[in-house]
Image (cartoon, rainbow, N blue to C red):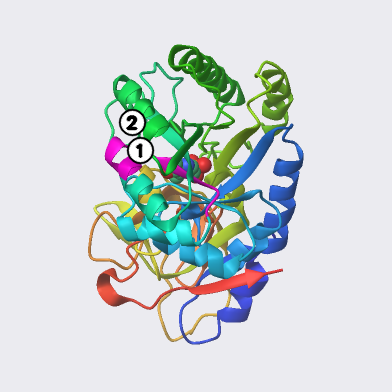
Amino acid sequence: MRDVSSWVHQRTRDGEPVCFYAHDLAALRAHVRSVVEALPEPCRMFYAAKANTGAPLLAALGSEVAGFEVASGGELAKVRAAAPGSPVVMGGPIPTPSEIDAGLAAGVLRFHVESLLGLHRISRAATAAGVTAQVLLRVNLAGPFPAATLAMAGRPTQFGIDEADLPDVIRAALTLPGIHLAGFHLHSLSNNLSAETHLTMLELYRDTVLAWEQRFGLRVTTVDVGGGVGVDYGDLDRPFDWATFTARLRDWVDTLPDHWEEIDFECGRFLVAECAAYAVEVLDVKHTHGRAYALVRGGTHQFRLPSSWQHSHPFDVVPVEHWDPTLPRPEAAAEEVTVCGELCTPKDVLAVEYVTRIRAGDVLVFRAAGAYGWEISHHDFLSHPHPEQLWIG
Ligand SMILES: *Cc1c(COP(=O)(O)O)cnc(C)c1O
């Protein structure tokens, strides 16, 4: 991600306070290309669109990834519009009949199915359309799992098919007319920071699917190992060790049966987090009860990630010298500052950090804002204007 201070300085005299997302598409393409190139056969990298569905980003990724993973009819439409020729796999906790129809009409490669009823709905729609839907069953494994920050399986969640229900669902998948059971889908955790742990999880996946093949007399062709490769927001200079991970992945791939034709990854955060920065102008600085607060244009309605993960998001201060000399210029110096947005709720906090100095009029640049930032935010709470979206390169 290139330095965004020149865009900051271009905007500081515009009248309206600085507030933008800047996406570096050249850096995005370079990062994703190196990630994909390191994958051994028969691994494929899909992009989980929900991390960021910005049209220029989807278009930029179209030629870099094996395809897109979409979790709704809306995501399907955005991907089709921005990257028309790219393969799509379709999941989502509970697609509606019309979303399933849209997936079939769009010719999605595979459906990832999370319940018996969901399987029946797809079978009915596929039969009506005169096609056979390729299906992966998403299973909520019994675990136990290696520790990561957000587990979607190995415990009660709304996701996937309970491992105990698998015999019934497999029987249905093998007998329903519109369905071809291509394999299994095992997205179980999010934001995993350890290459070692990720490999351990893949070993569990391999052993589990091999055991199912034995038990149910199956030969699957596709196993989707999900996303969940993490970004360490507490230390952005220490990225997930993809080199070590993919080196060990080569050994893992060598242990797979030949009829497993495709291993799908569907990463969101790891592919796009680093390609964007969120820049906001400090509108005021004050102290209450002995603590310092910086209030910015923007906030968690535009960048909900830190409040959703309950972390302090890393930022750089871009000092801006331009200031109206007839106004006071408050500042915080050599102290811990709580960075707040413009919402009337105490939850609107982006960061709590020790700073050398922050003045009203300076601009804060939050790094690694490309995944689950704008995308997950409640944009219209308090009806403030939306940030500018810059797409560079
Ligand atoms: C969110 C999600 C992903 C992407 O997860 P990341 O942690 O962003 O890599 C992949 N697959 C499914 C089913 C998801 O729900």
Along the line of sight, the residue nearer the viewer: 208 or 197: 208
Question: At x 66% / y 50%, what residue is drawn?
Answer: 65
Residue 62 position, x and y percent, is 65, 59
- Tag 1: Cα neighbours inside 10 Å, few (<14), some, or many (≥20)? many
Residue at the image position 31 percent from the left and 37 percent from the top: 115
Q: Which mark is residue 161?
A: 2
Q: Is residue 323 visible?
A: yes
Q: Which sits earlier in the primary sequence, circle 2 or circle 1?
A: 1
x and y percentages locating residue 303 in the rendered image: 42, 59
Residue 97, by quadrant, is bottom left
Residue in view at x 56 percent, y 50 percent = 273
Check disc 2 and report its element: helix, strand or loop. Answer: strand
Looking at the rendered image, the quarter that the C terminus falls into is bottom right
Q: Secondary structure at mark 1?
A: loop
**Image height of 42 relative to 105, above or below:** above
Q: Residue at x 46, y 30 (%)?
A: 186
Q: Give percent across and percent down for residue 169.
A: 34, 29
Packing grade of label 2 (10 A; few <14, some 14-19, many >=20) is many
Going by the numbered disc 1, the residue's amino acid type is: Glu
Nearest the viewer among 45 and 281 is 45
Mark 2 → mark 1, Cα distance in angstroms: 5 Å
Of residues 163 and 204, the one drawn nearer to the viewer in this rendering: 163
| Figure check: 57 above or below 263 | below
For the N terminus, the quadrant is bottom right
Residue at mark 1? 114
Q: Is residue 337 visible?
A: no
Q: Is residue 298 magenta?
A: no
Amino acid of disc 2: Ile
* Mark 2 touches mark 1? (CB < 8 Å): yes
Viewed as shown, does residue 355 lie left or right of 155?
right
Numbered range of the magenta stretch: 108-120
